[in-house]
Image (cartoon, rainbow, N blue to C red):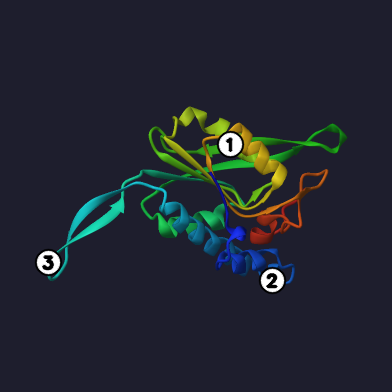
């Protein structure tokens, strides 16, 4: 299942427009805030596809029958760019566990690069729902490498992949490699440059959120 929010008018379009706007991007706090708000929006959409149980709640005047979340969740975030969206998801799923992983582009001879993973902090995933968050899905390599890095942490019962913007090529790769994953995207852009940057995209989400890192 693939959901692309740009295909249906919603307030997510406002967040995406601000995230892409080169003038609005000058304000790091606002850029982070818009990623966070997009995360809240996407988390609410995903919540409709989870499991619930009935719980009786005592009110001051009686007893109410409520539907409460039953699915155990782990929110996995690729550092550092995924942190603002992660916070948005935590605002919705405040009892979820969290996993944090590093993935970066390691230059190779000839100007190419490989995705390298490093730091991994993750609870047991066995039987849980893993929601993996990264603002940009360019080639799809980061998602695939991170999932391989998580393979020692148990097998989740279900998998959701979340990105603000994806390239069509990266989406095809991830869908082919992970046919059972549910994929949630703000927008899909057609062009991917030779250096694997999404066009028009929005630039480097990590740099825009937290400052330019040294090469």
Q: Check disc 1 and report its element: helix, strand or loop.
A: helix
Q: Position of residue 181 (x, y in %)?
A: 52, 39
At x 69%, y 36%, the residue is 115
At x 67%, y 35%, the residue is 116
Residue under pointer 1: 146
| Residue 129 falls left or right of residue 117 | left
Spatial separation of the CA atoms under disc 2 and disc 1? 31 Å
**Nearest to N terminus: mark 2 or mark 1:** 2
Q: Position of residue 71 (x, y in %)?
A: 35, 44
- Residue at the front extreme of this rendering: 8
Spatial separation of the CA atoms under disc 2 and disc 3? 49 Å
Instruction: Point out the frontmost of discs 2 and 3.
Output: 3
Residue under pointer 2: 24
Q: Position of residue 188 (x, y in %)?
A: 67, 52
Residue under pointer 3: 62
Q: Check disc 3 and report its element: helix, strand or loop.
A: loop
Q: Are marks 2 and 1 in contact (CB under 8 Å)?
A: no
- Residue at the right extreme of this rendering: 110
Asked if residue 140 can be seen in this view, the reply is no
At x 48%, y 60%, the residue is 40
Q: Are marks 2 and 3 in contact (CB under 8 Å)?
A: no
10 Å neighbourhood of mark 1: few (<14), some, or many (≥20)? many
At x 12%, y 66%, the residue is 62
**Nearest to N terminus: mark 2 or mark 3:** 2
| Residue 16 falls left or right of residue 169 | left
10 Å neighbourhood of mark 3: few (<14), some, or many (≥20)? few
Instruction: Point out the frontmost of discs 3 and 1.
Output: 3
Q: Is residue 109 above or below residue 214?
A: above
Q: Quadrant of residue 44?
A: bottom left
């Amino acid at each position: 299942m693939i959901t692309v929010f740009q295909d249906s008018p919603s307030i997510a379009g406002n967040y995406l427009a601000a995230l892409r706007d080169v003038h609005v991007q000058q304000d790091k706090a606002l850029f982070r805030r818009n990623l966070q708000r997009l995360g809240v929006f996407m988390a609410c959409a995903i919540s409709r596809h989870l499991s619930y149980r009935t719980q009786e709640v005592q009110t001051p005047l009686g007893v109410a029958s409520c539907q409460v979340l039953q699915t155990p969740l782990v929110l996995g975030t690729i550092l550092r760019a995924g942190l603002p969206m992660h916070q948005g998801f935590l605002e919705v799923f405040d009892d979820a566990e969290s996993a944090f992983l590093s993935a970066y582009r390691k230059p190779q001879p000839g100007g190419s690069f490989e995705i390298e993973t490093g730091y991994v902090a993750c609870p047991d995933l066995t039987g849980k729902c893993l929601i993996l968050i990264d603002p940009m899905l360019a080639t799809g390599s980061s998602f695939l490498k991170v999932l391989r890095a998580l393979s020692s942490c148990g097998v989740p019962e279900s998998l959701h992949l979340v990105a603000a913007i994806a390239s069509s090529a990266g989406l095809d790769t991830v869908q082919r490699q992970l046919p059972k994953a549910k994929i949630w995207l703000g927008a899909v852009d057609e062009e991917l440059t030779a250096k694997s940057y999404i066009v028009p995209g929005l630039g480097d989400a990590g740099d825009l959120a937290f400052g330019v890192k040294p090469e």
